[in-house]
Image (cartoon, rainbow, N blue to C red):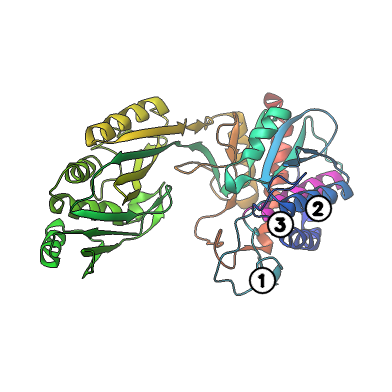
Amino acid sequence: MDMTKVFERIEQLKPDMIKTLGQLISYPSFRQQPEDGAPYGRPARECLRRALEICEDLGFETKTVGDMVGTAKFTEGEPSLGILAHLDVVPAGDGWTLDPFDAKVIDGKLFGRGAMDDKGPAVSVIYAMKALKDLGVPLQNSFELILGTDEECGSSDIAYFKEHAKMPKWLFTPDANYPLINIEKGHINAKFFKEAKRGVLVSMHGGKTINAVPASAEAVLSGVSAKEAASAVESAGCSAKFNITETETGVKLEVCGVSAHASTPDMGDNALTALIKVLAPLVSDEPCGSLLRGLAEKFPYKETDGKSAGVAACDEVSGALTLVLSILDFENGRFDGGIDIRFPVCTSVKAVSDGLGKALEEAGFSHKIGGSEPHCVPADSEFVKSLLGAYEAVTKKEGKCLAIGGGTYVHGTPGGVAFGCEIDGEDNRIHGADEFIRTDALVENAKIFAEAVCRVCNNPELK
């Protein structure tokens, strides 16, 4: 259908979009202390209520589910399409040059926490709905906007929604990248541990977050000279930087690497595995020595594909498995560690867990392993083709499917894909200081979503 008038109406709604986004940004809706009727804190609840009030004022039927999720329906009838966005944000953090919860437009950019992740995209959906309604655009099937409030902290909101409401057959979230993400790798989180008597190794600490390549690590050794430590560092030949000092408790080794997300470990330099490589020949007493050598063997420095642990896997559509030994502490006679794995669609939680468990046991450690299976919607499905067609029609750019190692709001929901709103080459400072969205991107996203709704809801094969 000709979308010219719809796009013109969206252009006219740009000031309203900016005003609405500013209102939603004013709520510091990161997870806070729960209250009655506010499971994620008062600001998240109030932000959800305000968003639904706006949708009601625009003529849409709304409801809430457990004070966690809200919906705005386009027309009567069971929706076949759901658009899933979220109103929760991460805390502001440091480094802002503007008030993170007082939106400002400067040089065509709207700044504020949540501007791109994910309040801005949610506003684009609301005003795409508004334009379609204003012009009475006919749709064979209905759709609804679903607004969550716990995406940043585990998506317990959507788990609750699935138990107490019906998820539409087709679903996309505007909370990732264009053109479209149809494959998300499976995910394994493993914890491993072992009691071990303190000896040469006095203490060790590396990594704080299981889903990140650790940028720093340190250890204190007793009975080892600074010269011996320096010789071991030189022999190891690591690109991570080492600093060696003598303290009252022993020689201290500090390592500086490069952090990266666990889904792209090749972009980092793992300070922890560099430290393990150096410590393995230095710690001669047992059991710490054999435990460190076991880790160095199974999870060697610079290896990110899990080959030495026996879990390597790769396929053409989703790429290679990635493995990060991301946390290891030795304190009070006990090792505690963590491993993050992202694995392709050609394998499974069981296969990877079994292989990893065997590797950890051979290294001398006990373990607890859990995970989720890969998420995949076929690239040749009518749903995917309809969304990519909408993207191409509006942007005049090639539409293609992407596979990622991270997980999105639709992971584990059948028929769900991620569709927008980030584009390659633009850093919107998501989760960082001075997060922003371009005001013209608000408009373009609304056009893409309006086009997508029309294509999906008028496709007889997508009832």
Q: How far is mark 1 from mark 2, CA to CA?
A: 20 Å
User: What secondary structure is marked by label 2?
Assistant: helix
Q: CA distance from mark 3 to mark 1?
A: 24 Å
Element type where label 3 sits in the image? helix
Residue where numbered disc 3 is placed: 443
For badge 2, the amino acid type reads Arg
Magenta highlight range? 117-134
Residue 321 image point, x, y percent: 35, 38
Q: Mark 1 or mark 2: which comes first in sequence?
A: 2
Q: Position of residue 274 (x, y in %)?
A: 24, 55
- Picture residue at 16% right of the left edge, 43% below the top: 286
Kindly identify which numbered label has been placed on residue 50.
2
Whether residue 130 appears in magenta in the rendering, the answer is yes
Task: Tell me which numbered mark, 2 or 3, is placed earlier along the sequence.
Answer: 2
Nearer-the-camera pick, 79 or 138: 79
Let me know if residue 270 appears in the view.
no
Relative to 239, residue 157 above or below: above
Q: Pointers 1 and 2 in contact (CB under 8 A)? A: no
Q: Is residue 93 left or right of residue 339?
A: right
Q: In the rendering, at what x and y percent does residue 19 appear?
A: 79, 63
Q: Tell which of 463 and 153 is nearer to you.
A: 153
Residue 347 location, quadrant: top left
